[in-house]
Image: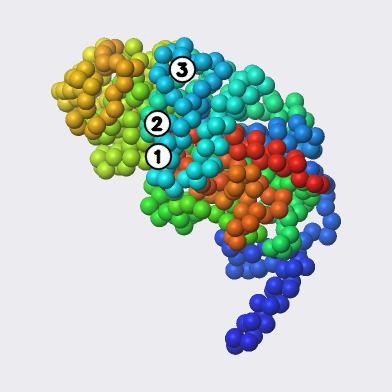
Amino acid sequence: MSRRGFLQTVGGMGALAATSGLALNLLGRDADAAAVRPLPKSWDEEIDVVIIGSGFAGLSAAAEAASRGSSVVILEKMPIFGGNSIINGGGYNAWTDKLKLRQKLDRGDDSVELHVKDTLKGGDFYNDPELVRMMVEGSPVALDWMIDEGGLKLKEVLNRIGGHSAYRGHVTLDGTGRGFVYALKKIADRSGARMRLGTKVSWIWRKDPASPVLGVEVETRKGKRNIKVKQALIIASGGFGRDVKMRQMFNPSITAAFNCTNQPGATGEVIRFAQAIGADSLQLCFIQLYPTADPDSGTLDRYALYPSRSPGNGSVFVNKLGKRFVSELERRDNVARAEINTGMKRAFTVFGEKMIPKMTTMEEVNEGIAAGRVWKANTLAELAKQMDVPAAALEETVAKHNGYLKAGKDPEFNKPFTPQMMALEGPYYSVAQWPAVHHCMGGLRINALGQVIDIWGSPIPHLYAAGEVTGGVHGSNRLGANAGPDAVVFGRIAGANAAREKA
């Protein structure tokens, strides 16, 4: 084709896009087939606020928008609601709370500034400082909101998780994200929001680069429908951890060899749809490996959380040789990297019985023993046999660590000791662990109002996003238990601002 012919073709496509609808699907499967999709001739229904996704962010957004009088529908492609949120570890960082757990449990001091500092440092300062501060300041408010309005119940524990310099990790009563999801759904339901399961968004409609978002195309068992969005569309569809091709497109090192903690619906197609209508994205190469998933299944079960919750109490991580290989209070990416560098395909957390009330319940641990996920022994030699590691090495490791704790200095890995930590004594317990794909730190670019930003730096009218589908909050690495505050705080912001849009 001649240069003149090429320019004529491009010009014609631009004119067609202006009348038929912007649909430059840069990442979609049909990118080489057709650049333009015509706008629907009519709408099957009209709704004020449409929300894609039913996890923490989507439910929070729905509750806020519906409480302000907007008609709200949550679209969930899976047959059950909750997304990754309902299977997460039930952790939530807040520097304070209405229950005053910090004071009650004598867990030391914390502040907004300290939480902000930890989060920025943990993300290698790739974070947007404004978004980080909004998350940290809004986190306790959102936690109290879920307690007051949703009936959220918490364990009387407060954990210090890797990368954090204070004990701020709250945990739901059942130790999973279910408690948060049910509390948020209760608030959303009471506010009048509705949910449709098995409803997959297959396109986002926008006329041209200057127009607002107009609606969405959805697929159900009964066929395709087009929904007109009168006020705003909120994207809360999560990350793309389950899409190996998309992972490798941005980070070739995250191969199919890694298991994944995510639910099957975490495939990222809505990010592609948003990009196709002009949305900007950032930091999509930052993909987190959860360092302590079940080595066999890759799942994030309740017992995979013990390595996250126990280091603040004095546990140790050991390899198959029975030796420590990293500071147990390192952030997730560094622990995962250290595990992989052992080349042993399996590592372990060892903790003592006195630590259990500080992180969970004995009943839950006993259930883990019955399920074969937790080992228990009265001596380290007996425990080493169950773990299949050298007994003498494990005994030496624990003795050294207890000595370091007493001296207040870790010459091997420079772990910071605190007064809340205790010596590792029997009866002893252990769980096996190995990295699995867990969280996408990158995603759609948003501003402080939750608006999605286009590739020119301007908000796309009537389009918002919150939660893991967005980027900029966590930087290169998400600190444990910061996902909940991110999703709930920005979900509330997006929902409130969406409801203010003129229909």
* Mark 2 residue element: loop
| Residue picked out by circle 2 | 164
| Residue picked out by circle 3 | 102
Does residue 376 appear left or right of residue 382 in this picture? right
Does residue 54 appear left or right of residue 436 in this picture? right
Residue 114 x, y percent position in the rendering: 43, 31
Q: CA distance from mark 1 to mark 2?
A: 8 Å
The answer to whether marks 1 and 2 mark residues whose Cβ atoms lie closer than 8 Å is: yes
Q: Residues within 10 Å of mark 1 (few under 14, many from 20)?
A: many
**Looking at this view, is 207 or 241 the one in front?**
207
The answer to whether marks 3 and 1 mark residues whose Cβ atoms lie closer than 8 Å is: no
* Mark 1 residue element: helix
Does residue 388 appear left or right of residue 80 in this picture? left
Q: CA distance from mark 3 to mark 2?
A: 15 Å
* Mark 3 residue element: helix
The correct choice, above or below, for 364 with respect to 214 in the image is above
Residue drawn at x 66%, y 68% as measured from the top left: 34
Q: Amino acid at mark 3?
A: Arg
| Residue picked out by circle 1 | 122
The correct choice, above or below, for 125 with respect to 212 in the image is above
Find residue 185 and name its label: none
Which quadrant, please, contains the N terminus? bottom right
The correct choice, above or below, for 81 with respect to 369 in the image is below
Does residue 431 appear left or right of residue 42 in this picture? left
Residue drawn at x 32%, y 42% as measured from the top left: 337
Residue 16 x, y percent position in the rendering: 74, 71
Q: CA distance from mark 3 to mark 1?
A: 22 Å
Q: Amino acid at mark 1?
A: Gly
